[in-house]
Image: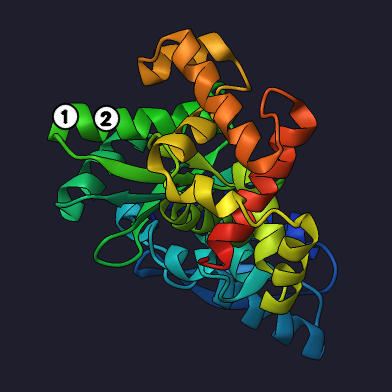
Amino acid sequence: MNADSLAQLKRMFEDIRKETGTELSLSPLVGDCKAFQLAFRGEEATVYIRGAGEEAENRIRLVRYLVSGSSGNKSAVAGEGLKGILLGEGGEWEAFRYLTKHNFADGRCFAADVVPDKRTDEAYKLIERCIEGGRDRAVRMDDSRIAIVKFSGEESADEFAQFVFQSLYEELGLRASVGVGCEVDSFSEIASSYSQAVTAVKLSGIFHSKGEVHAYREYLLVTMLEDLPEARLKEYMAQFRMSNTAEVFADAELYGTAEQFLENDLNVSETSRALFLHRNTLMYRLDKIKRITGLDLKNFSDAVTFRVISILYKLLKL
């Protein structure tokens, strides 16, 4: 076995020791130990494990399971099993096995869900080039989706997602929706982050969110309400007693103005610029919404109420 393989095997032994307490060595250990043959990169090495009897045999099976399938072509095998981990298959143990097999250090990370409008194969190859050289990985989830696991660095999750979008658009002329999950403390939790990223893309379509990058945290209120039974949602809607609100939702001009105003943090000047409206025209529309609903969107409390009603309206498909 060449020096590179031996060095990687020793690093894997150290990771296994830290995670499971199993002591391994390529040379005999002092005290009780047992020798066994371990396949790695198409070759076999004699390995010594601390202990004896049935416990040692169980640990040998564990080590073989963790190390099995490793290859000299690191980039070719790095995606193996990642799709299942992102889908929550195997839990924390499978995540640990993946890190150990591919000699990746654990750490804070998040997942992104990228849905290009076309040519997913080309998009995937470009994303792989964008993230090569580190721990970050991409994998094709199906014919239309690409998942990315990004370990924490200097750039924020939103900055990275915007970088991915811009790269696809500028180099390939592709547009994409990019969902971003919350950052997690360990790779073992990455499935929850990926689920959030997928949810962000889905909700961005339902709520016609502007922009191309959609962070899950933006939809926390939506997901909280979405988990409630329909009967409870209708009950909440009835409590607002605002039958005229539907008039605003049915008017694309009024509703678009309200949404833009909320997205611009209730800033009149920013909203006027975004909609190419004169300030007086914007104020007229906001006043009209107030006359119809009784809600003054320039008031933070009323703006929150309008947002909740808007979410309930869309979830109930009224």
Q: Position of residue 315 (x, y in %)?
A: 57, 64
| Front in this rendered view, residue 266 or 152 | 266
Q: Residue at x 80, y 61 (%)?
A: 239
Q: Secondary structure at mark 1?
A: helix
Question: Is residue 180 left or right of 106 when viewed as pictured?
Answer: left
10 Å neighbourhood of mark 1: few (<14), some, or many (≥20)?
Answer: few
Residue type, mark 1 in image: Glu
- The residue under label 2 is 167
**Residue at 53%, 77% in the rendered image:** 37
* Residue at 46% over, 36% down: 254
Residue 59 bears which disc, if any?
A: none
Whole-percent x, y for residue 84 in the image: 48, 71
Question: In the shown orientation, is residue 254 left or right of residue 246?
Answer: left
Question: Foreground residue, 309 or 35?
Answer: 309
State left or right for residue 166 relative to residue 110: left
Q: Position of residue 138 (x, y in %)?
A: 37, 50
Q: Amino acid at mark 2?
A: Ser
Relative vertical location of residue 97 with respect to residue 109 in this rendering, above or below: below
Regarding residue 302, the answer to whether it shows in the image is: yes
Asked if one can make out residue 49 in the rendered structure from this viewpoint, the answer is no
Residue that extends furthest to the right in the rendered view of this protein: 31
**Picture coordinates of residue 177, whole percent (x, y):** 35, 45
Alpha carbon distance from label 1 to label 2 = 6 Å
Say what secondary structure mark 2 lies in: helix
- Residue hosting label 1: 171
The quadrant in which the N terminus is found is bottom left
**CB atoms at circles 1 and 2 under 8 Å apart?**
yes
Q: Residues within 10 Å of mark 2 (few under 14, many from 20)?
A: some
